[in-house]
Amino acid sequence: FFFDTKMAFSRRHVSQYWLTALLSWGCALTVTGFQTSCTFHAKSNRPASTCSLAGTALLRGDIVRERRQNAVMGLRAQFAMPTLECVKNTRDLASVTGSPVKAGRAFRTSCVGTASENDSCIIIENIKTLIDLRSDREYQMDAEKYNSTVWASYDEMIYSVKKSKSGRATALIPTRAEGSIPRARHMLSVIDESIYKRGVFKRMHPGKKIKAAAYFAVSYTRAKQYFIDYINRAGLPLLNELILDYGGPSIKACLDVLADRSNHPVAFYCTAGKDRTGLIAMLVLSVLGVDDEAIVSDYVLSDSVYSDMKDKSAMVGALQQENLDPDTFLRAPRSVMDSTMKLLRKEYGGPHKYLESIGFGPADVLRLRAALCDE
């Protein structure tokens, strides 16, 4: 977690980030029909290979442009994605109790960069659109952290950011026409370090702001720890509060992708598929009429994902795991989603009003419902 000191203090910008050390391990799995293991290590120069799924040869990088074009095989016929070996925390929004979402249209998951060769084949064959909710810093670490080839078959959809005079993001605009992309990976970060800096400082009591400034005048390290201590005390509810406050343009863009049936099947993810992903799932399910208890129960299913991943370098809500209290940030207690939904009603008037405030109005909600729920 780093601080751009120009946001709150008069001190030279700290420009050099240090990268999290890479962690290598193998998690041998036994899955019927598969013989592979999940391994995370520095990207290798191994040659492209051919993977097979249900007797169909899938040539990495070529399947989209030469073989499938706009077709997505698998889900449209079977409406259930095969179990993945190494990508954790994957489930269909249709699986939530009371969900009106049709099976096979929208999935939540952890980062697909962890995919094994067989996982990559399954994802490519069954998912047309990826929505990546992680921060730019996390994107930049992908080449070193992951060895998966799954992203090679998806064209990146980059968005330009329209900002207000204060520097706050007000809208995201795609930089290319989506119609020409058979498979797309939408880069829609909902929170990053700059949001933490502004958001935390904004929420501090005036006395604490003065204290933080005093710390910074003496020691950057001490000031940084003061902010980290604040974040650890506030916990995951603060993360969700900041995403709702600052991430509106990204959330709207994400919902626009989900509301377009031509993008389906869609999978959206962050690092663990727990918090940023969970917030998007909550907003979608809420405006589709799913009750609070079912949404909270779905969130709690992610409680063990960090221990399942066994990746101590994995980011948590765009923050470095090593700076955070693991008991607070690595779990998914029902109290976190309970408090977030209460905040949504208290501060914004509920999920519908919140979405309307970010530019996703009633007509857009109807589009979302039609895309996800109609035959």
Image (spheres, rainbow, N blue to C red):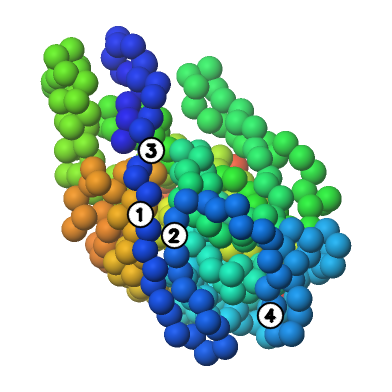
**Does the image show residue 258?**
no
- Label 4 crowd bin: few (<14), some (14–19), many (20+), radius 10 Å: few
Circle 2 SS class = strand
Q: Position of residue 245 (x, y in %)?
A: 42, 39
* Pointer 1 or 4: first along the chain: 1
Q: Amino acid at mark 2?
A: Phe
* Pointer 4 or 3: first along the chain: 3
Kindly check if marks 2 and 1 are in contact, taking CB atoms under 8 A apart as contact. Answer: yes
Q: Check the image and report above or below for 308 versus 15.
A: below
Q: CA distance from mark 2 to mark 1?
A: 7 Å
**Does the image show residue 125?**
yes
Q: Quadrant of residue 365?
A: bottom right
Q: Badge 4 is on which residue?
A: 53
Q: Badge 1 is on which residue?
A: 23
Q: Amino acid at mark 3?
A: Leu
Front-most of residues 155 and 172: 155
Circle 1 SS class = loop
Q: Badge 2 is on which residue?
A: 40
Q: CA distance from mark 4 to mark 3?
A: 36 Å
- Label 1 crowd bin: few (<14), some (14–19), many (20+), radius 10 Å: some
* Pointer 3 or 2: first along the chain: 3
Q: Position of residue 282 (x, y in %)?
A: 45, 61
- Label 2 crowd bin: few (<14), some (14–19), many (20+), radius 10 Å: many
* Pointer 2 or 4: first along the chain: 2
Q: Amino acid at mark 4?
A: Leu
Q: Badge 3 is on which residue?
A: 19
